[in-house]
Image: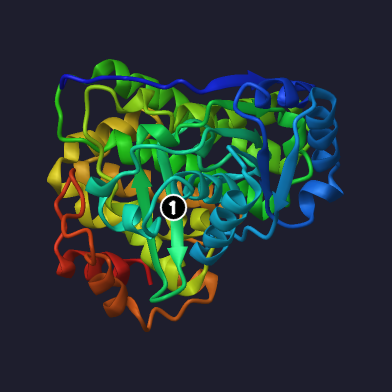
């Protein structure tokens, strides 16, 4: 186990009626909010009205910026930064899922910065070192952005999708009512579950030894998701199942499960190229990329895959050899993705794969090292994309 520091100041307010505390929590962050959200769903479901009532009851003034899309765009971030500066906004309240929160984080980082916030996505040495405080009302369990250090944004110029990670981006609070997820479309629920599982895979695949506690925490969280995601697909209003998925999504990405280890993270970056070019949902891209990454990279440390197969996917270790055990685990993973209605090949998503060479090259722009479990070359990336066709 490696030396580590763990810090996460996000206050989690979880359960039925949690949104009623939004105004009280927001009032602690500043004097005027940017209320940031996506399209019409937060209004159609009544979430918007509940949040606004809570803000008004607490006497919190706000301005609004809607229009966040999946794979959130830098152009809207630039609009938000200008709006905050013009209106004297001193904190940001994100109402939505990971895309909205990531966009809010980018705005919060950009307001006090003299340059272009995109600088932070290309060079982590530039920051951000300060940002407006951020609050969250979560409507989609998936990205874990409600208590993470990360933000992912797509720059329409060149369609580059990049991440920044800094502690100043951790939200000050996250309001989480599982009832808000009852009306999610099935595909969005499935993509969210895929994203949550991917966050745990990225951490699980490590070359660091003697990480048994975090291994077992990860395994328990993975098994929880594997059990409950299909349940919410079949019964969307099962509160207890929704709560299990929602809380797993937060735990998967709040960095507790990073402690003492170094994860891989190449699969996320491989997927960013896929969704950056084809605009596929992030979770759907991950269900395509991860099985291919596993098939290409498992030989870097087969024992870790065998452990996962045994402890999480219940593969019988009496099978003849490690290769068969690992392939059976990947087959079971693909079956789970398919049960949720997700693609496991580019062809399943209607993607021809004619630009995989371009994706393999773009993967290394501004991020020359890819992967920790197995360090990837451009040729490795190309082979993984070919396996994903």
Please tell me which residue is depicted at 72% across the width and 50% down the height of the picture. 64
Up-down relation of residue 15 to residue 106 (above or below):
above
Q: Residues within 10 Å of mark 1 (few under 14, many from 20)?
A: many
Please state the horizontal and vertical placement of residue 319, each as a whole percent of the image.
27, 38
Please state the horizontal and vertical placement of residue 358, each as a whole percent of the image.
29, 78
Up-down relation of residue 72 to residue 19 (above or below):
below
Quadrant in the picture for the N terminus? top left
Please state the horizontal and vertical placement of residue 202, each as a whole percent of the image.
32, 41
Please state the horizontal and vertical placement of residue 216, each as a whole percent of the image.
34, 20
Of residue 345 and residue 122, the one placed in the foreground of this image is 122
Quadrant assignment, res 255: top left
Residue 313 in view? no
Quadrant in the picture for the C terminus? bottom left
Of residue 180 and residue 242, the one placed in the foreground of this image is 180
Q: Is residue 355 left or right of residue 34?
A: left
SS type, badge 1:
strand
Residue 152 in view? yes
Of residue 259 and residue 337, the one placed in the foreground of this image is 259
How is the protein colored in the picture? rainbow
Please tell me which residue is depicted at 73% across the width and 41% down the height of the picture. 62
Please tell me which residue is depicted at 46% across the width and 20% down the height of the picture. 9
Up-down relation of residue 160 to residue 251 (above or below):
below
Quadrant assignment, res 56: top right
Residue to which mark 1 is pinned:
152
Please tell me which residue is depicted at 18% across the width and 64% down the height of the picture. 380
């Amino acid at each position: 186990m490696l030396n580590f520091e763990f810090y996460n100041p996000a206050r989690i307010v979880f359960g039925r009626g949690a949104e009623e505390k939004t105004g009280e929590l927001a009032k602690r962050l500043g004097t005027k909010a940017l209320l940031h959200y996506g399209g019409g769903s937060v209004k159609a479901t009544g979430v918007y009205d509940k949040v606004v009532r809570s803000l008004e009851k607490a006497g919190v003034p706000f301005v609004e910026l809607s229009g966040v899309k999946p794979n959130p765009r830098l152009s809207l971030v630039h609009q938000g930064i200008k709006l905050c500066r013009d209106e004297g906004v001193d904190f940001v309240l994100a109402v939505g899922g990971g895309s909205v929160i990531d966009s809010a984080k980018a705005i919060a980082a950009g307001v006090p910065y003299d340059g272009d916030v995109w600088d932070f996505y290309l060079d982590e040495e530039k920051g951000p070192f300060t940002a407006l405080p951020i609050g969250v009302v979560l409507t989609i369990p998936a990205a874990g952005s409600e208590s993470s250090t990360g933000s992912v944004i797509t720059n329409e110029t060149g369609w580059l999708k990049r991440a920044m990670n800094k502690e100043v981006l951790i939200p000050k609070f996250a309001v989480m009512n599982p009832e808000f997820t009852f009306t999610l479309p099935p595909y969005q629920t499935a993509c969210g579950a895929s994203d949550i599982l991917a966050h745990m895979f990225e951490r699980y695949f490590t070359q660091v030894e003697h990480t048994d506690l975090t291994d077992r925490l990860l395994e328990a969280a993975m098994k929880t998701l594997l059990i409950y995601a299909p349940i919410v697909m079949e019964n969307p209003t099962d509160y207890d199942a929704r709560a299990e998925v929602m809380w797993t999504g937060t735990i998967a990405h709040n960095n507790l499960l990073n402690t003492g280890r170094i994860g891989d993270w190449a699969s996320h970056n491989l997927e960013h190229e896929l969704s950056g070019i084809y605009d596929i949902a992030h979770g759907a891209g991950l269900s395509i990329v991860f099985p291919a990454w596993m098939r290409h990279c498992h030989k870097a440390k087969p024992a870790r895959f065998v452990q996962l197969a045994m402890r999480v996917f219940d593969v019988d270790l009496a099978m003849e050899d490690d290769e068969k055990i690992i392939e059976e685990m990947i087959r079971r993973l693909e079956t789970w993705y398919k049960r949720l209605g997700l693609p496991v090949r580019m062809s399943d998503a209607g993607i021809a794969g004619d630009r995989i060479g371009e994706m393999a090259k773009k993967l290394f722009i501004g991020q020359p090292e890819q992967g920790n479990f197995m360090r990837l070359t451009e040729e490795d990336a190309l082979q993984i994309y070919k396996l994903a066709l």
